[in-house]
Image (cartoon, rainbow, N blue to C red):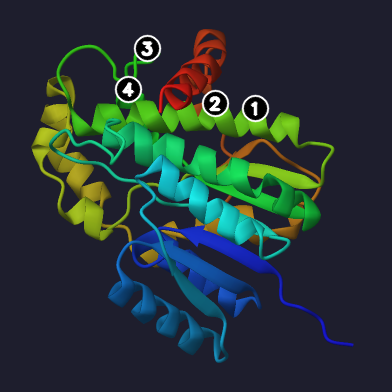
Amino acid sequence: MTVLARTAVVTGGTAGIGLQTAVGLAAQGWHVTVIGRDRARGDAAAARIDAAAGRPAARFVAADLSSVSATRALGSRLAAEGPVHLLVNNVGGIWTDRRESPEGIEASVALNHLSPYVLTEALLDALIAGAPSRIVNITSSVMVAAQPVFDDVEAPGPYYGMAATGRAKLAHLVHTLELAEHLRDRGVAVFAADPGPAATDNAAQMTIDVLPPAARPHWEQIRQGLSTPVAVAARAPLTAATDTGLDARTGLVIGPAGTPDDTLLALVTPEVRAAVPVWTRKILAAL
């Protein structure tokens, strides 16, 4: 009897932590679909994953995950292919200057929160069909710089990339915890994974302008933290995705050391937890 490989979807899987996560999964026998925008980078990533696994293990699917409509279309396509056993929502971004998605939503909110929210929603039935399955959402300690205000799409005041991304990551951590409870009895475990600071291409392009003024005296310390090799940073998502010690658990944050870490949960206050679902539905309803 032929045993089918377990299937994983990794967004932002053509470089950085996403690619390293995909390589690690393929080495453990998974078949991996990597999602990204650039065809050349995607084909190169799939070839690297195949080479690391020593077998055909990967494919690339192109999609612009900054677009809610494109993300929904991607989810529908993947869901139609059958059960999914693992979804790693790795895609994200942090920018010095304010940007917008194709639908006109501030880019941090679109890419770091709405994109994984919408893709997960589209793949829920496929993940339930693939149970036992897992969802891993990449989170970040940049949320300590966020204004935890969820009245409008964007926080009030000037735009700072780290604060904007942190706010979107905080919103998605709330969603991760809510989703874990919703799926607790459906065979789908949900985890957040914090890789910690890492030497990704995105990090290399950051300048001090990304920081709110109060954090700028710590810029050199922050830059030094961005030297962690990507392979080390991938430990958190790979643990969340594959560690059998987590089989009976859900709703955890897996920290940079690859172990459960409650540090970021202190930022999920009752007020934030109540506000985020209403805020998210309001944004999506307006699109």
Precedes in sequence: disc 2 or disc 3: 3
Identified by mark 2, the residue type is Val
Identified by mark 4, the residue type is Ala
Of tags 1 and 4, which is closer to the observer?
1
Task: Give the secondary structure at mark 2.
Answer: helix
The residue where tag 4 is placed is: 146
- Provide residue 130's location: percent of width, then percent of height: 77, 58
Q: Do tag 4 and tag 3 residues touch (Cβ < 8 Å)? A: no
Q: Do tag 2 and tag 1 residues touch (Cβ < 8 Å)? A: yes
Q: Which mark is residue 174?
A: 2
Front residue of 111/190: it is: 111
Precedes in sequence: disc 1 or disc 3: 3
Report crowding for label 3: few under 14, some 14 to 19, many 20 or more residues within 10 A (C-alpha). Answer: some
Count of labels in the image: 4
Q: Do tag 1 and tag 3 residues touch (Cβ < 8 Å)? A: no
- Which corner quadrant holds the N terminus? bottom right
- Provide residue 117's location: percent of width, then percent of height: 52, 38
Q: Is residue 186 visible?
A: yes
The residue where tag 1 is placed is: 178
As measured in the structure, the alpha-carbon distance from the residue carrying label 1 to the one carrying label 3 is 19 Å
As measured in the structure, the alpha-carbon distance from the residue carrying label 1 to the one carrying label 4 is 20 Å
Identified by mark 1, the residue type is Glu
Precedes in sequence: disc 1 or disc 4: 4
Q: Do tag 2 and tag 4 residues touch (Cβ < 8 Å)? A: no
